[in-house]
Image (cartoon, rainbow, N blue to C red):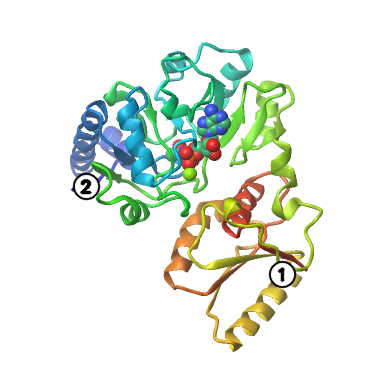
Amino acid sequence: MKTKIYDVTALSPETMRRAQTLRERDAMEIVKRAMKYVAEAARVIAAGGLVAFPTETVYGIGANAFDEAAVRRIYAAKGRPSDNPMIVHIARASDIGQLTPMISPAIVKLADSFWPGPLTMVLDRKSSVPSAVTGGLDTVAVRLPDEPAALDLIRLSGCPIAAPSANLSGSPSPTTAAHVIDDLEGKVDIILAGNPCRVGIESTVVDMTATPPEILRPGMLTADMLSAAVDAEVVYDKALLQGGAFSPECTASPRSPGMKYRHYAPKADMLVVEGSRDRVEAEIERLKDMNERIGNKVAVLLFEERSYIEAAHDFYARLRALDEESPGLIIAGALPDNDGAGFAVMNRMMKSAGYNVVRV
Ligand code: TXA
Ligand code: MG
């Protein structure tokens, strides 16, 4: 398949403001051209095609959520197992009614507080939502993204858009247009090539069918933030709190429990070093030295201390860039954060490393 790649970087709040308020001719022209591209992409979605598009979290690969055959093509393009459910993206909170019969005050509060934004709510699904979207579950995950190109695409296509992250299954999520082109050129009809994603890690997924609501995937929005918005308890899925770096069973020797835990994975082997900053830095140096002495090329993934939001923004891009250097081993420094962007990054980092961790 020949993939059309369209530049929609002009659909940034900044350029659009210049076009609208200052009426700058150049800005108006490039915004108009980008809007034409999005309109064409919307027609492709409506006709059952596949479009990769930017969101504020990561790029998505989308199809009409009500078109079962189109949704199945997403699985094929990603090489993704078809029991893994997708997030359905809407452009207006009121469109939630197309997908779910269940609206509670808590859902309305979360939508009011965090949409558009990096929050996905798992809700009871209407039977009209194809089971190809929900992986056979009786719930559906819904999100209203905060990105002009994505919102226009959904609005103009006239349907909710089912979209997982636009990476090949198992590889790091794409946060730039170049990542999407690397993974999906030739596999989708159109790639809307926008700006790098502002957030950089996927949305927080909260299960609203659970009491209290339960966060299934950590993201930029934390349990405390959701809890404050609904004025009630919101908890993390216990498995999240016990996983990998947070597990009391972590010992000083590397563990690798196997492929089934390896997601968002770089091609190289990966090891996470956890502990106080000084010790982590020293241990990384020591391991690097040791490996290089036996001819094993090492790449290091270490973020600035306490810059968790930056780490989230850069995580996947850094992972892809390191992989391109073809190291034998990537050694990463853990982020000591219990609830926030650092916690969300650690969830991904531990998966990338297949829970291969040393504590120092
Ligand atoms: O930020 C994001 O959420 C990005 C952008 C493109 O919106 N999308 C994304 O989609 O990360 P994906 O498919 O890579 O991840 C969807 C996550 C998976 O962990 C999936 O298991 C979960 O949401 N999920 C989807 N539907 C669900 C459901 N009905 N119940 C429980 N979990 C669900
Ligand atoms: Mg994904």
Displayed quadrant of residue 88: top left
Classify mark 1: residues with Cα within 10 Å, few (<14), some (14-19) or many (20+). Answer: many
The answer to whether 11 appears left or right of 282 in the picture is: left
Query: In this orientation, does residue 117 appear?
Result: yes
Q: Looking at the rendering, in which quadrant would you find the C terminus? A: bottom right
Q: Secondary structure at mark 2?
A: loop
Give the residue pinned by disc 2.
3
Q: Secondary structure at mark 1?
A: helix
Above or below residue 257? Residue 153 is above
Residue at figure coordinates x 38%, y 40% from the top left: 75
Residue at figure coordinates x 77%, y 52% from the top left: 247
Classify mark 2: residues with Cα within 10 Å, few (<14), some (14-19) or many (20+). Answer: some
Q: Nearer the viewer, residue 348 or 250?
A: 250
Q: What is the three-letter code of the residue carrying label 1?
A: Val
Q: Nearer the viewer, residue 228 or 302?
A: 302
Image coordinates of residue 25 in percent, x first then y, are 18, 41
Image coordinates of residue 337 in percent, x first then y, are 71, 51
The tag earlier along the polypeptide, 1 or 2, is 2
Displayed quadrant of residue 279: bottom right
The answer to whether 54 appears left or right of 220 in the picture is: left
Image coordinates of residue 31 in percent, x first then y, are 24, 39
Q: Indicate which label's residue lies in the foreground, 1 or 2.
A: 2
The answer to whether 124 appears left or right of 281 in the picture is: left
Image coordinates of residue 315 in percent, x first then y, are 53, 56
Above or below residue 357? Residue 121 is above
Give the residue pinned by disc 1.
280
Query: In this orientation, does residue 119 appear?
Result: no
Q: What is the three-letter code of the residue carrying label 2?
A: Thr
Above or below residue 54? Residue 132 is above
